[in-house]
Each structure stands twice: as structure tokens, then as C-alpha cells.
Image (cartoon, helix red, strand yellow):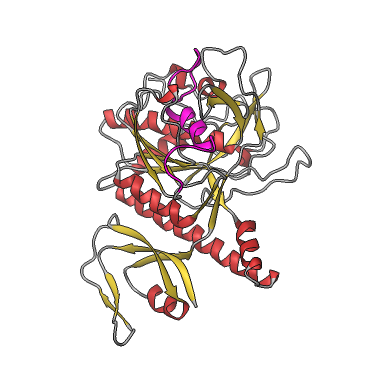
Amino acid sequence: MKTKLIVLRSKAHQATKDPFSGSFSFSRGLDVAPSVFKVDTEEIDSRDIPLISRDSSVLALAPVMPIKMIAPLRLELDTVPKLGIEAWGVRAVGADKSPYTGNGIVVSVLDTGIDMNHAAFSDVQIIQKDFTGEGNGDQNGHGTHCAGTIFGRDVQGMRIGVAIGVKKTIIGKVLDKDGAGSTDQIMDAIVWAIDSGANVISMSLGMDFPGFVKYLVEKDYPLELATSIALDAYRANTQLFERLAALIRANGNFSQTTIIVAAAGNESRRNINPDWEISVSPPAVSEGIISVAALDEAENGQLSIASFSNTGANVSAPGVSIISAKSGGGLIALSGTSMAAPHVAGIAAIWAEKLKKNGRLNSVELSARVIGTARMTNFTPGYDPFDVGAGMVWAPQE
């Protein structure tokens, strides 16, 4: 039986299959820096998987799983009244007072694409690639909203973007108009974004475990077996993202500095029962990826965890009633950890600019600044530190 697998390989070694004997032979060669890697998606006979996994060039492998957009929970208004000078999230993370804007830093958004004709992106260089087969553009609106929060210019007199000095962006369309994709598309897009020079990669998406179980059941697998297979695939894909993140981190010590920021997920339901909390979902849960929880702001300005936000994230950021670019023009307000992650990506770009000016830009230092400078101030009394991670991210002020 053939299985569609994602294979993460070091380019230092190659495994080849003899066309006559059918056996694999390995050319081990010399070890090289861990930054030299590639991702392939292959149809592999299940009997060959043990042989491939023993190949020294194979760093990780996992079956392809469905990915879905972390959908916003609340749609506010098609037109936003009483526009201020900046969206509340921009102010909350200190971006409006920072002397840095992300200038000279390349940001990638892997989502549903982007409406490149929106006024928020009028002077931004946008490099696009479609991984869905649907074509470039944003037929959903999710990616446009996320991009607007990271680097969008002022719209209708309102500042919506955190890192408004970003001039070059890498937009990978990995989710279709329905918000659906797959892990192989994500892995390919991450490698493409790095090769294109991205310093910060933002992802507001998660593995679709229930969708994969349903797919297997529709293929006539018994429910118990389908659940077990999906669980194995879930675990393997989490490890795959962890290994890739480790390689990207190592790569930053030698050449391209890149960090990945991802939304923690919206499955918690604290508004129904305070104990109904769900842990961070993949790929955000993978070690080496900065996971982001969503915050709400009360009338008195104090911050609290959003009822839907998954718990156990690395950091937190504004994620309720976030005003940003609407595909087709204008503004729209959405809520979700999908809206929180772009704030962190924007803050990462701002920190990256500062570190670059000081000659200290690398993946380890950048991650440390984003997480280490997060603040635990101004939270409502009795908050759970595990919900907000290191705290709300904060832009450098000098």
C-alpha cells in the first residue's frame, strides 16, 4: 500500500532505490551544517518506510495531514465606526511608541493569501506563491486581515499595522477559500519563505485532527482504527515541525535568520465553563515555534485571557475585536488567536530591526527578545500565568 509521506532530509546524504533489486542504498558522505536540508512529499510503499527511516539523511518523516485555518470566532462589523488613531492592539503592545518599525526586515504570512490591491499594502513589495492550486489572491479574507495587523499601512485614518516599516513580504497561499490545506503544503511554503529571505514567518492555522479521522472513516476504516492512525499521524507531524524548527534555528547561526510564530488555537470555552481549557494545538505546540494566546481588553484597560484562547502558549497578544484590512477594501474587526499571532509577528519584526542595527540579529537572540521582554503587567487580578505564557509581547522603546 502506498502512503503519502513528508520527508525532511539533510542534503549531506542521499538515499537511492535500485531500479533492479528494489533495495535502498545510502551515500553517507561528510556531515555538513544542519542548515542544509530539504522537504519532499513522496508516495512510498509502506514496506519501505522502515528502510527509509533508517537512512542517515532522513531527519524526520510524517504522513500528510489536513490543515485548517484557525477561524475567527466573532465577526464584528463590515464598517468600523469611531476610528481612532491606532487599533487597540497596536497601542497595547507599545508599537505606537517604538522608534523601530520593522524597516529592513522581511516578513512572511502563510495563510489564505492576500488582497495585494488593498490600500493597506500600497507601498509594500509583495512576493506571492500559491500552494493550493487555487491561484494567488485571497478569496477568504483571513490572510489579508492577518497581514494588515503585521505590516498594514494606515486605512481610513487608523493605524492597523504593528510593523509599518516592513517593505518586503513573502505571502504563501497555503489555505484555500474554505480555509483548508495540508501539512505538506505548509512545509513546502516554510522552506520557500526561508529561501526567499523571510526573517519572520506568521501562521494562523492548525492541524485538522477531526477532519483526518472523518477522511479515514469515509475510506471505510473502523472509527477506532481511524482515530489511532490519525493520532499517530498527529504525533509524527508535531515532531516533523519540531525538527524543522530546530534546523531553522541552527540555520540562523550561519546564514538566514528566521523565526516562526503561530496561533495557539481557539478551542477553549471558558465562557461556558472555566475548566474547559484546551492546550496549544499543532503546529504551534511544536518546540521551537513561538505559540501565541489571545488577550481581551476591558473598559478599564486591564487585560484578560480571551475565553476561546488555548492555554500553555509561549506569549500572548491582543486577539479580540482586532480591526484590520478587509479583503476587497476597507476594514473589519475579527477575534481569535489568529488575530493575536500577527501582533507577535509584527513585534518580532520590530525587534529584528533593532538587533540588525546592533549587529546581533540571529534566531536565538530574536526569539529571546520576543519572549523575554513580554510583560505580566496590567492583567486582571487572579489571572492564570499559564494562560498568558511569558506575558504580552512588548516593542522596544529605545
Q: Is residue 316 visible?
A: no
Q: Is residue 186 above or below residue 88?
A: below
Could you say which is closer to the camera, residue 139 or residue 205?
139
With 249 as the anchor, is 29 left or right in this view? left
Percent of width and height locating residue 359: 25, 33
Percent of width and height locating residue 307: 69, 36
Q: Can residue 384 be found in the magenta stretch?
A: no
| Point 38% across, 23% down: residue | 122
**Res 52 quadrant in image:** bottom left
With 118 as the anchor, is 392 left or right in this view? right
With 343 as the anchor, is 98 left or right in this view? left
Q: Residue furthest right?
A: 272
Q: Residue furthest front?
A: 134
| Point 66% across, 36% down: residue | 73
Q: Is residue 40 above or below residue 144?
A: below
| Point 42% across, 73% down: residue | 44
Percent of width and height locating residue 74: 67, 33
Q: Is residue 16 above or below residue 83?
A: below
Could you say which is closer to the camera, residue 386 or residue 158?
158
Q: Can residue 148 be found in the magenta stretch?
A: yes
Q: Main secondary structure of the magenta part?
A: loop
Q: How many marks?
A: 0
Percent of width and height locating residue 126: 35, 33
Could you say which is closer to the camera, residue 243 or residue 228?
228
Residues shaded magenta: 134-162
Question: Which quarter of the rendered picture does the C terminus lie within?
Answer: top left
